[in-house]
Image: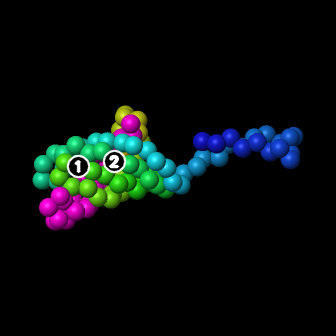
Amino acid sequence: VEIVTKADHPEKPPEVVIKDRGFTRRLGGGVVYAGEFLPLVDLKVGFWKRYSATVGVTPRFGGIGVSRHIDDLTPFQNFEILGLAGPSWDGKLQIGIGVRTNF
């Protein structure tokens, strides 16, 4: 949330602007399921409304992913569902789905 003041029009009240897209660098973590449950460390690099682009690493594979905030459906703050895909450490494609949050 950003409050914008109008320096050239001091008689007008400030506006509240909600920034719902852009680039960011947010370290996070969670758990993904890819045949077994794996811990995840990731970096959120961009966001658009409730969706985010991430780059993540697990003990079995690393890759890029897309997440969506689900904290509007759950009582937990800053909670997201995540899909992650990338090469495993032996070169095969690996896909995982799980949950993440920002640290």
Query: Mark 2 is on which residue type?
Result: Asp
Query: From this viewpoint, which residue is outermost toward the front?
Result: 90
- State the mark number for residue 2: none
The residue at the point 18 percent across, 59 percent down is 88
Question: In front here: 71 or 97?
Answer: 97
Which residue is identified by label 1? Answer: 58
Query: From this viewpoint, which residue is outermost toward the left?
Result: 35
From this viewpoint, is residue 46 visible?
yes
> Label 2 near label 1: C-beta < 8 Å?
no
Which residue is identified by label 2? Answer: 42
Label 1 and label 2: CA atoms lie apart by: 9 Å
Q: Earlier in the sequence, mark 1 or mark 2?
A: 2
Task: Give percent across and percent down for residue 41.
Answer: 30, 45
In the image, residue 93 lies in the stretch drawn in magenta: yes
**SS under mark 1:** loop
Question: In front here: 79 or 28?
Answer: 28
Task: Give percent across and percent down for residue 19.
Answer: 58, 49
Are there few (<14), some (14-19), or many (20+) residues within 10 Å of tag 2? many
The magenta stretch is: 81-103
